[in-house]
Amino acid sequence: MTGLALQLAAELFPRGVTQYAVGGVMVAAGIAVIYLGTAIIPGNSTFLETTLSYVSNLSRFNQPKYLASRDWRVVFALSIVAGAAVWGLLLDPGAFTTEVQPWRLFGGGILVGIGTRIGKGCTAGHGVCGLGSASRTSLVNVVLFVGVAIVTATVVAALGVTP
């Protein structure tokens, strides 16, 4: 059983799991710091609305809850990008390349954005914070996130779509 699990892990993660483990610990630590410092469950699904409050006079973007949290949400989002950049540039040097066409990346990003608004949260909010606090709503959302991802990947692969 252990040999089969190791073989499967080697096939699924040919470059190892270290970067995923380190990233997971860093995300959890960042979320813990924000929660302990602000008592707010952090997530990035509200990032756009809070940052639009810097440049928009619309009441939707200038709600007190957005104004109060916009600064740390910007730092939170930038730290995610910075962490990936540090890993990619210093700890795992080499250019990141993909064969996925830019329009597909853009389309996928739009669909993910729509999904996070419909689901009222992102994977950080529901997957890390919500599951960690035993939220049934977050459990349902995470099951839906993963289920839709599995079905989508299976259908796309069956259709023969490649990057």
Image (cartoon, rainbow, N blue to C red):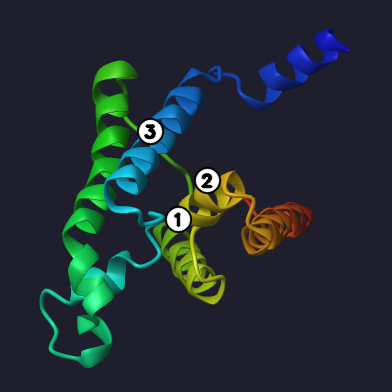
Callout 3: few (<14), some (14-19), or many (20+) C-alpha neighbours within 10 Å?
few
Residue 125 location, x and y as percent? 48, 55
Q: Which residue is mark 3?
A: 29
Q: Which mark is residue 19?
A: none
| Screen quadrant of the N terminus | top right
| Mark closest to the chain's N terminus, 3 or 2 | 3
How many marks are shown on the rendered structure?
3
* Foreground of the two, 154 or 144: 144
Q: Residue at x 30, y 20 (%)?
A: 93
Which amino acid type is shown beneath numbered disc 1?
Gln
Callout 2: SS = helix
Q: Please tell me whether mark 1 sits on a helix, a strand or a loop.
A: loop
Residue 113 spot, x, y in % from top left: 45, 68
Contact (CB < 8 A) between labels 1 and 3? no
Mark-to-mark CA distance, 2 and 1: 30 Å
Q: Is residue 138 left or right of residue 94?
A: right
Seen from the viewer's position, the closer of residues 73 and 18 is 73
Q: Residue at x 28, y 74 (%)?
A: 49
Residue 51 in the image, given as x and y percentages of width and height: 20, 69
Does residue 23 sit above or below 91 in this rendering? below
**Residue highlighted by disc 2:** 128
Give left or right: position of 14 versus 80: right
